[in-house]
Amino acid sequence: MSTSVDTSVAAGAKYEPVIGLEVHVQLLTATKIFCSCSTRFGAPPNTNVCPVCLGMPGALPVLNRKAVEFATLAAMALNCRINETSIFARKNYFYPDLPKGYQISQYDKPLAEHGFIEVPANGRRKKIGITRVHLEEDAGKSLHEGFPDSAEKTAIDLNRTGVPLIEIVSEPDIATPDEAYEYLTRLKEIILYTGVSDCNMEEGSLRCDANVSVRPRGQKEFGTKTEIKNVNSFRFIREALVYEIGRQVEVIESGGKITQETRLYNANEGKTYGMRSKEQAHDYRYFPEPDLLPLVVDEKWRAEIARSLPELPEARRERMVKEYGITEYDAQVLTFSRSLADQFETAAKAAKNPKRVANLVQGELMGRLKAKGIDIEQSPISMKGVAASADLVEAGAISGKMLKDLYDLCFERGKDFPQVYEDEGRPQQSTDTSALEKIIDEVLTANPRQLEQYRAGKKTMLGFFVGQVMKASKGQANPQLVNELLSKKLE
Ligand code: ADP
Ligand code: ZN
Ligand code: MG
């Protein structure tokens, strides 16, 4: 072992990281936050724009009611207190993709505060505080690539300008990169359940900036933080944090000081690089937006919004475990999305044995999906199909082996179970005793050596014979019946 590894491990134990995350989520409204331009992703550049979102002099913003409702719903799902009155503010800065010269955001009076998300940590549940959830408009996009003639050009697409966002700011409660990963996974899951965003990271509907500092274990004051920007997957955020924590410890251990700055993560190299020293908050010269009234979400409106709050994933899993007698792991898989959970519950309620439905998803469906590289939302066999197959097994109409074969056919043909079952002529497992006895006789005659071993006391040979009979019946025999008949015959 080299000494440098020893020192870095020792240094790692001497310090503890402090992490806080700022997540931007794009709201799924049809139109922008302050004008009626479309928010559609992928439209030709600069086609979804108007004087308001282009920041023309004299154009006035009008607040989108739906954006407020979506933001409030998300904040409620994140256990926040909704402020009856919140204030829009101008955040002033110059950037080519911001034609107004300021972004309309919220500052000292945000829409919502004091929330939390629960994450698993060391086998327990830990609450990560949410400082605030506020509404703001997105900026445009600068495109530095895709110019075959010159690499020095930059193009601006202002379609995204004015698309509604919420920013969700966490407390510096996150203690490890793994916890950050969990927090983001839960956050995304909750937002998806509320339906206010598609959280598509590739399209930029969910973006995360990670703030991180380290301090000597036991010290109360926080160290100086850096902010890692523009990381485009949760896995990369975890990696970037691991790297950045190591870097900060090294700087401090070698007598240096951390500068408060924004850093970029290069996923290919697995390293962060300093980009610019962070503007102090007062540099933005925030002041109340004079063109918008204070936003008032009164009790009546809040109650109305609260009515569309769905059962959230964690609570749903708990209930499903109790209601269907399934494991926590089953529940985790079956709540992958709200629509899958809905489908499962509808199917399971109609099925004779909900537990068997869950078992089939776990035992027969997941492996096939994985082999095909698709997730459960794209499964050829629907939850209804799984339930139908579970009922057939439950009633003894088909054997487990037959079910497996039928599932294979479903995946080959891309068809749901009931369809394939019909197409195959509603196969039934054989309960025809005389036909089975004939097969048993054939199997015993064909395997004299094994028969001798059985007679000599090797009772485990029974399993061998059952297997042979099942095979000879092409899986259509009822295994229980085969067992009975074989035992009788061998006596
Ligand atoms: P800024 O003024 O730089 O935007 P904020 O106080 O608003 O900083 O915090 C931004 C984010 O950084 C929050 O998620 C917060 O929890 C986190 N944060 C604040 N201080 C620290 C620190 N010393 N170390 C790690 N994270 C921090
Ligand atoms: Zn517009
Ligand atoms: Mg801040």
Image (tube, rainbow, N blue to C red):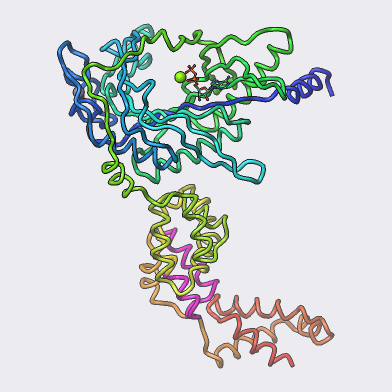
What number of labels is visible?
0
Place of residue 156 in the rendered image (x, y in percent of width and height, measured from the top left):
29, 15
- Residue 202 visible within the image: no
Residue 72 found in image quarter: top left
Q: Is residue 196 left or right of residue 211?
A: left
> Is 428 placed above or below 148 here?
below
Residue 192 found in image quarter: top left
Residue 407 shown in magenta:
yes
> Is 209 placed above or below 151 here?
below
The residue at 23%/24% (across/down) is 293
Place of residue 434 in the rendered image (x, y in percent of width and height, measured from the top left):
56, 93
The residue at 38%/39% (across/down) is 74
The residue at 27%/29% (across/down) is 295
Residue 480 found in image quarter: bottom right
Looking at this view, is 183 or 41 the one in front?
183
Extreme residue in the left direction: 58
Q: Is residue 348 left or right of residue 83?
A: right
Question: Magenta stretch: dominant SS?
Answer: helix
Instruction: State which quarter of the image contains the N terminus.
Output: top right
Q: Is residue 309 left or right of residue 464?
A: left
Place of residue 225 in the rendered image (x, y in percent of width and height, measured from the top left):
57, 17
The residue at 21%/18% (across/down) is 291
Looking at this view, is 459 or 365 the one in front?
365
User: Which range is magenta?
Assistant: 388-412
Residue 150 shown in magenta:
no
Looking at this view, is 146 or 378 the one in front?
378
Place of residue 368 in the rendered image (x, y in percent of width and height, measured from the top left):
51, 56
- Residue 437 visible within the image: yes
Instruction: State which quarter of the image contains the C terminus.
Output: bottom right
